[in-house]
Image: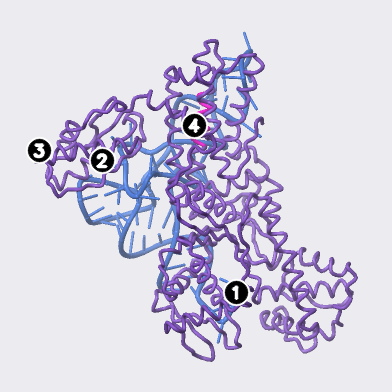
Amino acid sequence: MKQKIAELILQAIETLKVNGILGQDVSPQVTIERSRDAGHGDYASNLALVLAKPAKLAPRQLAEQLVAALPQHEAVVKVELAGPGFINFFIDPCAQHQIINRIHHERAEFGLSRVGAGKKVQVEFVSANPTGPLHVGHGRGAAYGSVVADLLKAVGFDVHREYYVNDAGRQMDILATSIWLRYLEECGELVVFPSNGYRGDYVREIALDIHNSAAIEYRRPAALVLEDIPADEPQGGDKETHIDALIARAKTLLGNTLYRDFFQIGLNNILQDIKADLHEFGVDYQEWFSERQLMDDGSVEKALACLRAGGHLYEKDGAVWFASSVLGDEKDRVVVRENGQYTYFASDIAYHMNKLDRGFDQMIDIWGADHHGYIPRVRAAIKALGADESKLSVLLVQFATLYRGEEKVQMSTRSGEFVTLRQLRNEVGKDAARFFYVMRRSEQHMDFDLKLATSKSNENPVFYVQYAYARVCSVLRQLDEKAWERNVALGMANLARLTEEHELLLINTLARFPETLERAALHYEPHQLVQYLRELANEFHTYYNAHQFLVEEAAVRDARLNLICAVKQVLANGLGLLNITTPESM
RNA sequence: GCGCUUGUAGCUCAACCGGAUAGAGCACCAGCCUUCUAAGCUGGGGGUCGCAGGUUCGAGUCCUGCCAAGCGCGCCA
C-alpha cells in the first residue's frame, strides 16, 4: 500500500514538473508514514513540507497543487490536506480487510520477508567465560541476542549464531586451581582458599565429584602446596601474585597431564552446564567456537603475522604492541606479553580474522556494556587486517541492576554471591524471564526487581499477551460446544460486515505486523515487537469486551471468527519469534 | 581527568529514527461478571521530555555546553 501511494505521489510530482511548478532538478525522497492518529487517515506524507523550500512555495499551497495532480486510485477513498502541509490518505476499508485473508493463507509465514536474502550474518552473543554458571546479567544478552538472531532470520538473512568460548587464559587456570584446592580440602588437606579463587558452590561440587570417583593421584600434602607461596591479600600480600604462585605450584606438583585433567574437567563441566542452561532458556547456537583452538592451530600467529606485515606491530619493553592508536583507539595495546604469552586481545584479533575469512557480510557482536571500551581496539584490528570496518556491528546490552525490593543485590562471580540465570528461570519461568529481558531497549539501563518478578509474577505483561491468545482458543472451544459450524469461506465473503470501530482498528494493527517485524529486525530492536504484541493484545481484549463474537447471524459470526483467528495467528507468530509459549488456556 | 551509555507521569518504560494534541503498565480514584475465561474492559486525575543555548517550516529525537546516574580507562578476561 505504501508503495502504491508513493507511486501516486511520484506521478503527481512529474505532473507538477511538466507544469513548471516544480523545477526539473528536484528529486525528493518520498516518505510515506502510517498515521498515528486515525483522524489523519491511514497514511501521511510530509512531502510538501520538505519540498516547500526548493519549490519556493508555501507548504500548504504546494500540498494543494500536489493533491490536485494526484491520479485516482481505487483503494484511496479520500485525500486530505492537514496541519502545516501534510497530505493524508484514507484507504478503503474493504481493501484493508483483505489482510485477514492473507493471514489465513500465509499462516506462520505471515510477516516474514526477504529483505535480507542472500546476506550472511553472524551473531555472537553471551560468550561468558566458562568459569561458572551464567547469572542474571548474562540472561539479558542471551535473550536479546537470540531474538535479534531470530528476527534477522525472519526477514531473510542467513543467520549463524555463535558462542565464543574463552577456554584459554588465566581465568581458566584460576578455575582449575580452585577446583584442585577444593579437592585437596575434600581429601582432608588443610589449605587456605585464595581470596581471588572461585568460591562458588559449583567449584566444590566438581571437586567432590573428582574425589568421589576415588581419584587419589591428585592429592599432594598441603605443606608442599603452600611452601614459599607469597601472602594473600588478607595477610597483607597481593592476591594476584598469590594466586599466580598457586597456579604455578599446581602445575609443578601435578605435572602437565594431571593438571590438564583439572582444567579439562572444570571446563567440560561448566560448559555443559551453560549449554543446558541456555537450551532450557530457548537459546541455541550453530557453533561453540573455541579460543584455545585459535591458539593451537596457529591462527593467532597468523593474525599477528598479518598485522606485522602491514607494519602495525612494534616491540617495546620486551612486549609486542599493536599500534591501534593511529586507527582510532585511545592507546596502543599489547598483544604478546613480556613472558611470551598472548593476551586475550591477540586471540580476539585472530577470532575476528577468522570471522572475516568465513565470509560473513555482517558480524554482530553483542557485548555487555562494561566492554564498551573494547570496541575501538577491535575496530582498529579489523581496519589493520585490511577489512571493511562497517562489517562489524557491536551492540551493547546494558546491565540490569538487581534489586530485592529496595535493596541492591551485589554480584560477583568470584565470591559466588550471585543470582544464577537458572534460579531466575525456576522462579519466574522461561516465558516471563525472556519477555522481561527483551521488553526494554537494550541500551536502557534497567532495574530488575527480583521481589517483583517472583512474588507478583502475575503482573508480568507476558501473561497479558498470552491471555489474548488463550481467549481466542477459548472462543473456538465455545463454538464447538454450541455446535455451530465455522465456515471460513462465508466469513471471508463477508469481511465487509466488520465495520465496528474496534474491528477496523484491529485490522489496521494486523496489517502493521510485517513492517513492525522488519523494523525490529533491521534496527536490532526486539522491544518493538514486544510493544506491538502488547498493543495487539490490548486491542483484542478491548474488542472482546465490547462485542460478542458468537452471534446468531452466521455471516457476521464467521467474519468475526476469521478476524480473531488472524489475531491468534499473528500473536503466535510474534510470540514464536520471542520463543515464548502460546498456551491454549490459562 | 578522559571516554561510552542513559536522563520522559509518583514508580518501571514506549514514542515507527526530525512530524501533527508525548503514550502504556504499575500505583491511586470511580464503574463493568444471569452473555465467548474479570490474568480482562471503561472512565478519571497525574508532564517545564535533566538544565541552557543552537540548527529549521517543525526538536523528546540532531549539534554545543553544563548537571546527574551507570559503566569503562591493565603486559586481566
Q: Are marks 4 and 1 in contact (CB under 8 Å)?
A: no
Q: CA distance from mark 1 to mark 3?
A: 67 Å
Q: Which subunit holds the residue at mark 4?
A: A
Q: Are marks 1 and 2 in contact (CB under 8 Å)?
A: no
Span of residues in magenta: A534-543
Which residue sits at x=49%, y=84%? A321
SS of the residue under disc 3: loop
Which residue sits at x=44%, y=84%? A309
Q: CA distance from mark 4 to mark 2?
A: 31 Å
Counting residues from the N terminus, which is met first, the one under dot 3 or under dot 4? 3
x, y percent for residue A364: 49, 60
Which residue sits at x=54%, y=91%? A318
Outermost residue on the left side: it is A20
Counting residues from the N terminus, which is met first, the one under dot 1 or under dot 2? 2
Outermost residue on the front side: it is A118
Q: Is residue A161 magenta?
A: no
| Residue carrying label 3 | A19
Counting residues from the N terminus, which is met first, the one under dot 2 or under dot 3? 3
Counting residues from the N terminus, which is met first, the one under dot 4 or under dot 2? 2
| Residue carrying label 4 | A103
Q: CA distance from mark 3 to mark 4?
A: 43 Å
| Residue carrying label 2 | A46
Q: Which chain is assigned purple?
A: A
Left or right of residue B27, residue A392 in this image: left
